[in-house]
Each structure stands twice: as structure tokens, then as C-alpha cells.
Image: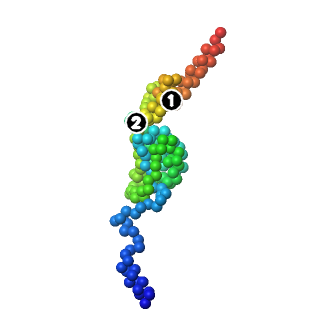
């Protein structure tokens, strides 16, 4: 009699499972879902691209913008980019519902206005990052803060070489 009673009780008790997808299921605590880039914080410095073991982060230039793209189909959700981002612009969401029928289309993108080098004209840094650099050294070296790293190295080497040449003169 107890087995029949238990069967009847379970019949009217309702389902044991969630009614997903009609009712959204919460992600477990600490779940590593999609990556999100806060465009107001991102400086397009490239740290995320350098530390990504899966090479799922791409830096690109378009017009006068630097673009940071994170491809979710290649991301292993290790969290290295989140941990190493010096500006706290990348975070892991607790979202597991993201699908696409074509590879490479599921991505997160941040477009950041960029600064052009005053010598070569190449994009080299986000405007926000350039403001951070200029704020720290603008008083001492105002001309060098508007140069890309390659041009800055060439100009600095030229200045050092000319100073050494001047010291050798009698």
C-alpha cells in the first residue's frame, strides 16, 4: 500500500525539474559565462590580447578607432583577461544563453576613439589612455606624449645621440 500511496502523491506533487526555457534558470554561483567589455572603462591597451591563452581576443584599427573583440566561440572562460585588465573593463557574466549558427559571430566588441601619432600618422593609443599618459608626463615631455612607441623610441634615441655628439666637441 505504501508504494501505491507514494506513486499517487508524486503524481500530484508537480515536476521535479525546472520549466526551462519557459522559466529562466539561474546560473550557479561563480559560473563563468560570456565576457562583457565596459566601453567607458576600456583603454584598448592590449593587455587582454597578450594574456589570452586561447587567442580569443583581437585588437583592430578602423578609421579613427581601436576595436577590442572577444570571440566567445574561442574563449575558454579562464578569466585571465578579467584578472589582468588594469582598468577593470572586462567582466564575466553569469549568462549561459548565447548561441549562433555561424562561428565567429558571437563576440563582444568595444570601440574606443584613438589618437594618431604626430609623426607617422598610425593609431597608437586610445584617447583615454593618451590622456592618462599625458597627465603623468605632459609637463616634462609634451612632444613625446603625442608619438607612438616606435616614433618615441626613434626621437629619444636621436636626442641621446645628439647629446653624446655635443659632449665630444671641444
- SS for callout 1: helix
**Camera-side residue of 115 and 1:** 1
Q: Residue furthest left?
A: 22
- Asked if residue 120 can be seen in this view, the reply is no
Residue named by callout 1 = 136
Mark positioned earlier in the residue sequence (1 or 2): 2
Instruction: Mark 1 vs mark 2: give the one in front.
Output: 1
Give the Cα separation between the discs numbered 1 and 2.
20 Å
Query: In the picture shown, does residue 51 fall above or below 20?
Result: above
Q: Are marks 1 and 2 in contact (CB under 8 Å)?
A: no
- Asked if residue 89 can be seen in this view, the reply is yes
- Residue 27 at x, y = what percent? 44, 60
- Residue 56 at x, y = what percent? 48, 49
Image quarter of the N terminus? bottom left
- Residue 2 at x, y = what percent? 44, 87
> Which quadrant would residue 20 be assigned to in this image?
bottom left
- SS for callout 2: strand
Image quarter of the C terminus? top right
Q: Residue furthest top?
A: 170
**Camera-side residue of 86 and 122:** 86
Residue named by callout 2 = 113
The local crowd at label 1, few if under 14, some if 14 to 19, many if 20 or more residues have their Cα within 10 Å, is few
- Residue 17 at x, y = what percent? 41, 71
Q: Write the residue at 65% across / 14% down.
A: 168
Q: Write the residue at 44% across / 29% down.
A: 121
Q: Would you say 87 lies left or right of 63 here?
A: right
Task: Name the disc covering residue 10, or none.
Answer: none
Amino acid at each position: 500500500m505504501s508504494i501505491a500511496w507514494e506513486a499517487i502523491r508524486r503524481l500530484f506533487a508537480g515536476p521535479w525539474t525546472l520549466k526551462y526555457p519557459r522559466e529562466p534558470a539561474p546560473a550557479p554561483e561563480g559560473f563563468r559565462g560570456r565576457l562583457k567589455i565596459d566601453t567607458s572603462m576600456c583603454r584598448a591597451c592590449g593587455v587582454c590580447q597578450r594574456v589570452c591563452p586561447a587567442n580569443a581576443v583581437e585588437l583592430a584599427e578602423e578609421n579613427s578607432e581601436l576595436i577590442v573583440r572577444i570571440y566567445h566561440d574561442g574563449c575558454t572562460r579562464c578569466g585571465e583577461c578579467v584578472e589582468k585588465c588594469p582598468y577593470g573593463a572586462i567582466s564575466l557574466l553569469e549568462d549561459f544563453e548565447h548561441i549562433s549558427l555561424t562561428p565567429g559571430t558571437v563576440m563582444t566588441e568595444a570601440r574606443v576613439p584613438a589618437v594618431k601619432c604626430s609623426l607617422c600618422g598610425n593609431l597608437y593609443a586610445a584617447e583615454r589612455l593618451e590622456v592618462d599618459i599625458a597627465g603623468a608626463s605632459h609637463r616634462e615631455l609634451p612632444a613625446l606624449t603625442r608619438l607612438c612607441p616606435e616614433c618615441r623610441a626613434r626621437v629619444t634615441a636621436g636626442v641621446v645621440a645628439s647629446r653624446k655628439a655635443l659632449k665630444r666637441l671641444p
